[in-house]
Image: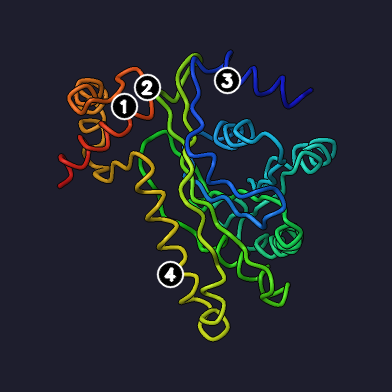
């Protein structure tokens, strides 16, 4: 009942319209699955993924400081599937070892067929660009496979969050899934060259997310590029024969505009 209430409030009250694109790419429940996404709007990002699922409860790795607010907060957050991640920039080097406990719990959860979600940028911003990825998610995924004797195939599913506007309510939101990536073909390489295996998987994941999202890489001229795509996105979508009122179609047109500017 709470999930239905949350979905209704998210999809119809907070947002004017929401889109869940390519959800058929999500493997059946019980498949060891790590969802990896861009991170652009704090709590809104994981909430969008939660309501796009019908039958499963994903677990999230999230910033550790919220768990320290109060013992009850710590207990509640863990009960709904959140686990703390300690970050060098925010929590200090002395706390990084605490991630081992989180990783052990998460690795076993993956092997048991739980869906885990991580944001490898380890931070979020209110702009349409993709930051640097930490390799923590690839390390955790391969270590889970190793814990299971490399018998189970673990999948990574790239995804992206996209917003018509970041601030205020009654805007539009979209979560779009890519195609799942099997780690099994990389197991033998990982046994001898773990870092190389992680780099190769990360490159595949990042490429998919870049292709899914609006990635304005010209940060120096971001405001100018953003102004152009906002004001001409619908017109270009119409020229491409797309639905100018649909956020996924406008995203495709805006990507064309940004690609032309950044070429």
Which residue sits at x=66%, y=70%?
A: 145
Check whether the beta carbons of the residues at disc 4 and disc 1 lie within 8 A of each other. Answer: no
| Element on which disc 3 rests | helix
**In terms of sequence position, does the residue under pointer 3 or pointer 4 come before the other?**
3
Which residue sits at x=44%, y=25%?
A: 166
Check whether the beta carbons of the residues at disc 2 and disc 1 lie within 8 A of each other. Answer: yes
User: Dot 4 corresponds to which residue?
Assistant: 200
Q: CA distance from mark 2 to mark 1?
A: 6 Å
Q: Nearer the viewer, mark 2 or mark 3?
A: 2
Mark 3 burial class by Cα count in 10 Å: few <14, some 14-19, many 20+:
many
| Element on which disc 2 rests | loop
In the rendered image, the residue lying farthest to the bottom is 192
The image position of residue 15, as x and y in percent, is 52, 18
**In terms of sequence position, does the residue under pointer 2 or pointer 3 come before the other?**
3
User: Dot 1 corresponds to which residue?
Assistant: 250
The image position of residue 113, as x and y in percent, is 72, 56
| Element on which disc 4 rests | helix
Residue 162 position by quadrant: top left
Q: CA distance from mark 2 to mark 3?
A: 15 Å
Residue 165 position by quadrant: top left
Q: Is residue 85 left or right of residue 124?
A: right
User: Dot 2 corresponds to which residue?
Assistant: 246
72 shown above or below 154: above
User: Dot 3 corresponds to which residue?
Assistant: 11
Disc number for residue 173: none
């Amino acid at each position: 009942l709470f999930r239905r209430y949350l979905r209704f409030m998210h999809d119809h009250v907070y947002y004017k319209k929401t889109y869940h694109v390519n959800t058929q790419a999500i493997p059946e429940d019980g498949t060891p699955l790590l969802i990896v996404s861009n991170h652009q709007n704090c709590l809104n990002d994981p909430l969008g993924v939660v309501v796009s699922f019908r039958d499963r409860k994903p677990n999230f790795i999230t910033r550790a400081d919220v768990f320290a607010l109060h013992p009850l907060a710590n207990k509640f957050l863990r009960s709904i599937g959140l686990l703390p991640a300690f970050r060098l920039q925010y929590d200090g080097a002395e706390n990084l070892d605490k991630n081992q406990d989180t990783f052990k719990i998460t690795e076993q959860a993956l092997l048991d067929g739980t869906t885990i979600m991580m944001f490898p940028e380890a931070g979020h911003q209110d702009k349409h660009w993709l930051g640097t990825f930490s390799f923590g998610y690839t390390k955790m995924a391969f270590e889970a496979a190793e814990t299971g004797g490399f018998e189970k195939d673990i999948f990574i599913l790239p995804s992206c969050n996209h917003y018509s506007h970041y601030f205020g309510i009654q805007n539009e939101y979209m979560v779009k899934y890519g195609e799942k990536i099997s780690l099994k073909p990389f197991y033998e390489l990982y046994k001898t060259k773990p870092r190389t295996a992680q780099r190769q998987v990360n490159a595949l994941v990042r490429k998919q997310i870049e292709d899914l999202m609006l990635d304005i890489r010209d940060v120096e001229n971001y405001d100018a590029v953003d102004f152009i795509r906002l004001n001409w996105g619908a017109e270009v979508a119409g020229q491409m024969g797309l639905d100018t009122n649909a956020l996924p179609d406008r995203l495709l047109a805006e990507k064309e505009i940004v690609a032309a500017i950044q070429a």
